[in-house]
Structure formats: C-alpha cells, structure tokens
Amino acid sequence: MKSLLATLALSTALTLPGLASARPVTLTTTLSNYGGDGAYLALYVTDASGAYAGSLWMAGGKSKYYEHLSDWYRATGGDPAQINGITGASVGAGRTLEITLDLADALFDAGYTLHIDAAVEDMRDSPNEVAIPLTTDGVGKPVAGRRYVASFAYDM
C-alpha cells in the first residue's frame, strides 16, 4: 500500500501538480566526453526499501534499447506506459540534459532515491549510473556518475 501511495504521490505531482503539495525541481545531467553515440538515460525513483516508485524521464526514443537500462527495465518490466509523455531525445557525449518537473514534497527527506541508468550503443551499459537520496540538504550539490555522467544535480 505504501508503494502505491508513493507512486500516486509521484504521478499526481507530475501530472496534476495543483492537487498535491509539489514544487518545481530542475534535474541537470551533464555527460562526460566518452567518445560514443548519444546515451539513453532513465531517471526514476525508488522508496526507502528500494521498491520502484515511478519514472521521471526517459532520454532516448527507441524502445528496443530500453532493456539496456537494466535496473529501470527490471523494475518496470520495460512497460512503456511508465514513460508515456515523459520522453525526449538521447543525450550526446559532453552534452547536458536539463529538465524541470513538479515533484511531490513528500519525496524529499523521506528515504526516496533518484536513480539514473545509462546505456550507449556499442559501449557498456551502466545501470545505477547515479543513485542520490532526495533530500533538501542535497539541493545544488553535484555528484559524479560511475561511467557516462560527469555530474548530476537537482535544484528547487
């Protein structure tokens, strides 16, 4: 039930921000110059127990590559309904993806973690490239990814 409530809080904040206590949050992901094609990125949230709570953004439009975003894919079963309306182009090496979303206040300082899975054609996949707790103390503090993400930060 708690996971369902978290999912509803997340989806409500994204689709109907007027109905939930939410705030605009800007997610900034800068890729390193890894020397390959554009990266597919899945940005999603898990709760304190590690259970999938919802997807925030999918960078990359060809669903045949989603299985390479293995942690996200496993959590969602690759269900495209999880990302309907929240997709964009893949992100090139050295480029920055900046998106602003309304996120439920209940996601902050409550044990939720924002994850980024990354995949690049003909290069190694990088599940859990970034995992950062959603806290008010973490606002504006960049973190480095494991392979393709040079830095990731969120601001309110």
Image: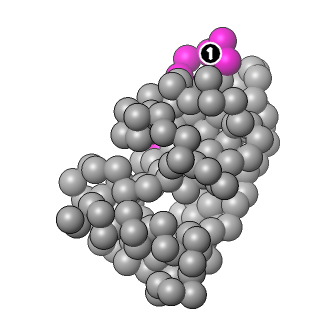
Q: Tell me the quadrant of the picture where the N terminus can be found.
A: bottom left
113 over 139 or under it: above or below: above
Q: Tell me the quadrant of the picture where the C terminus can be found.
A: bottom right
Residue furthest front in the image = 81
Residue 44 in sight: yes
Q: Quadrant of residue 37?
A: top right
- Estimate the x, y position of residue 96 in percent, counting from the top left: 75, 48
* Residue sitting at x 22%, y 66%: 2
| Amino acid type assigned to the residue bearing label 1 in the image | Met
Residues shaded magenta: 121-130
* Residue sitting at x 53%, y 47%: 81
80 over 10 or under it: above or below: above
Q: Nearer the viewer, residue 139 or 75?
A: 75
Q: Nearer the viewer, residue 114 or 143?
A: 114
- Estimate the x, y position of residue 150 in percent, counting from the top left: 63, 41
Left or right: 34, with 55 as reference point:
right
Q: Quadrant of residue 106?
A: bottom left
Magenta stretch encompasses residue 107: no
Q: Residues within 10 Å of mark 1 (few under 14, many from 20)?
A: few
- Estimate the x, y position of residue 49 in percent, counting from the top left: 21, 54
* Residue sitting at x 34%, y 67%: 6
Mark 1 lies on residue? 123
117 over 70 or under it: above or below: below
For the image shown, how many numbered marks are present on the structure? 1
- Estimate the x, y position of residue 58 in percent, counting from the top left: 62, 45
Left or right: 112, with 80 as reference point:
left
For mark 1, give the secondary structure.
loop
* Residue sitting at x 37%, y 40%: 75
